[in-house]
Amino acid sequence: MKVINTIAALKSLLEPIKLDQQKVALVPTMGALHKGHVSLINIAQQQADVVVCSIFVNPTQFTDPKDLEKYPRPLEDDLKTLEEAGCDVVFMPSVTEMYPEPEVWHIDLGPAEFLLEGEFRKGHYQGVTQVVKKLFDYVSPDLAFFGQKDFQQVLMIKNMVAHFNLPIQIISCPIIREDDGLAMSSRNIHLSAADRKNALVLSRALSFVKDNFSKLSIVELVEKAKVLIDETPGVELDYFIVANGETLLPENDKSHHDIVALVAAKVGETRLIDNMILN
């Protein structure tokens, strides 16, 4: 496994691989890796010859400086995880390497940018697409792998790829859950034992909606899911929605081919998101 810190070194490493017409996959991360990230690498290995994983805590996507400050950075553990997963290349740039000078970035990501997470974290997806575009430029991957847990993020990245007409296939990979149903997240380490237990209501509410999707109306499903969450101590709901997976607008037509339930809530001091595809 090669660990690279500069764009120049990354490009010179990947150039002969590209000339050899080997398929390159990119798994972008912010570190604090868990089994969910490892699953992305495993899926990428099945579809590409060389897997590049980036570790970069991107400042432009944090809408709260405190959030950026407390984001976990266990680099030693992360490198060990990637080594064990059989990752080929790790790209770990500094902030000055990625942003050598101040820059302005704003692209049209479509109306879905301003819904759900976009409403609670204004400007977040501009920051996400800004850094992902840089990574795409430096790695020039054939495929890029992202976790379904960040459902809206995957949609925004697909919109960015379409905006620039990039020849990159974006692949969304299933959510990896703990045995009790909690979606794996780098933020879970901030949960106290009580918070950790209370957080299970999010996956429970989503499972309830999925299990009863054919029996109850969407309005009833959302109502019951919200009650379930509101009754749980220490959990403050931001949103629970059954949405059209392409527009993220509320969906009332069960026959639509792409419907997803999405939830975000503050559990103790930690904000968690989760989702479940319903059909």
Image: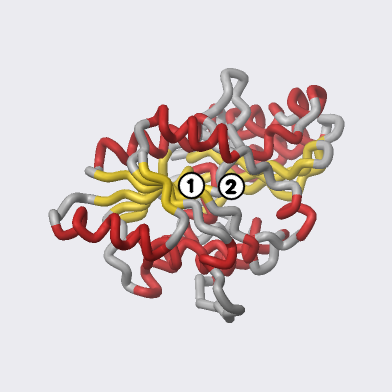
Q: Is residue 144 above or below residue 35?
A: below
Q: Secondary structure at mark 2?
A: strand
| Distance (Cα) linking label 2 and label 1 | 7 Å
Answer with left or right where residue 218 lies relative to residue 121. left
Answer with left or right where residue 28 lies relative to residue 193. left
Question: For the residue marked with disc 1, what is the amino acid?
Answer: Ile
Residue 31, horizontal then vertical, whole percent: 56, 44
Residue at the spot x=44%, y=67% of the render? 133
Answer with left or right where residue 224 lies relative to residue 211. right
Displayed quadrant of residue 140? bottom left
Residue 48, horizontal then vertical, whole percent: 24, 44
Q: Secondary structure at mark 1?
A: strand
Residue holding disc 1: 259
Displayed quadrant of residue 264? top right
Residue at the spot x=48%, y=40% of the render? 277
- Contact check, label 2 and label 1, Cβ < 8 Å: yes
Residue 86, horizontal then vertical, whole percent: 35, 32
Check residue 242 in the rendering and tell me which mark sits there, or answer none: 2
Residue at the spot x=69%, y=27% of the render? 200
Question: For the residue marked with disc 2, what is the amino acid?
Answer: Val
Residue at the far right: name it: 233
Q: Is residue 39 above or below residue 7?
A: above
